[in-house]
Amino acid sequence: MEKREIVTVGVVDDHHLMMDGLKLLVESMDGFRCVWTTDNAADCLARVEAKPPDMVLVDITMPDRNGIELIKDLRKLCPEVKLLVISMHDEEVYAQRALKAGARGYVMKSASHDEIRDTLLRVAEGRLGVSDDLSERMVEAFFSGQEASDRDLVGNLSDREFEVFQLVGECKTAAQIGEALGISSKTVDVYKSKIRGKLDIKPGDSLAAYAIRWVELKKIG
């Protein structure tokens, strides 16, 4: 029998317990090997540039770079690397953005080990790795001729606008948002103005109140 090639995997996650757990999970799979782990986007990019693995497991929330933007950077740097998001964030909110950015799959951290293993295998084989619920919504959106996220006005925001919106919902100031995203406070205000327009928030109504309510509802849901 021909020996199967080893699938090399890199892991980027700023929660070290989760990062170590994913490494152990990958190493427990026949034909897979975790070649490195890191807790930040900059080191991930440097490692991929130096020696690309077959696959990178990406978190959404990191201290130095949003996961969606990291996916875009990795796709430009090394398009052949397969990217799988493993995140605590609800797939309903982030999965389609991650797939649009270039990820080949999305699985929640709350998923069972078997679900994560199955998703890893599907992505390694070049297939799309998403939950049955998300797959059904994507098919429904395709046949309706409308993206599922369009049902929610927040889905119309660009990735950067969505980042600003979410940080507003977490009660961050313009200065804090600017520091987190590497942009000026004035640029944050420009994004806020664009967000108000896309969400049809009337003059005098609070963007912060809308964003906070949206963030809290997503936590509950």
Image (tube, grey):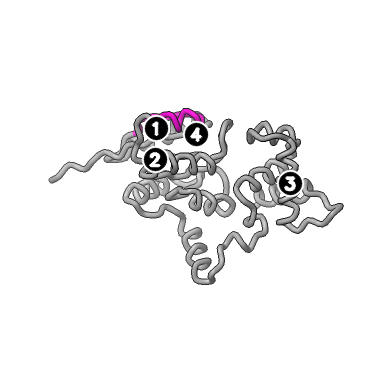
Q: Secondary structure at mark 3?
A: helix
Gap in Å between the C-alphas at discs 3 and 4? 29 Å
Q: Earlier in the sequence, mark 3 or mark 4?
A: 4
Residue type at mark 2?
Cys
Disc 1/disc 2 C-alpha distance (Å): 7 Å
Mark 3 in CB contact with mark 4 (< 8 angstroms) = no
Nearest to the eye among marks 4 and 1: give it: 1
Up-down relation of residue 159 to residue 187 (above or below) = below
**In the displayed structure image, the side of residue 104 where residue 144 appears, left or right:** right
* Numbered circle sitting on residue 13: 4
Residue 60 x, y percent position in the rendering: 54, 41
Q: Position of residue 74 (x, y in %)?
A: 45, 40
As for residue 96 lying within the magenta part, the answer is: no
Taking the image as shown, residue 211 lies to the left or right of residue 137, namely: right
Please report contact status of discs 1 and 2: CB closer than 8 Å, yes or no. Answer: yes
Residue bearing the label numbered 1: 49
Q: Which residues are magenta?
A: 34-47
The three-letter amino acid code for the residue at tag 1 is Glu
Q: Does label 1 or label 2 sit earlier along the sequence? A: 1
Q: Which mark is residue 192?
A: 3
Q: Which mark is residue 78?
A: 2
Return the residue nearer the eye: 206 or 33: 206
- Density class for disc 4 (Cα within 10 Å; few <14, some 14-19, many ≥20) is many
Classify 220 as above or below 148: above
Residue at the spot 73% in from the left edge and 44% down from the top edge = 190
Q: Nearer the viewer, residue 212 or 18?
A: 212
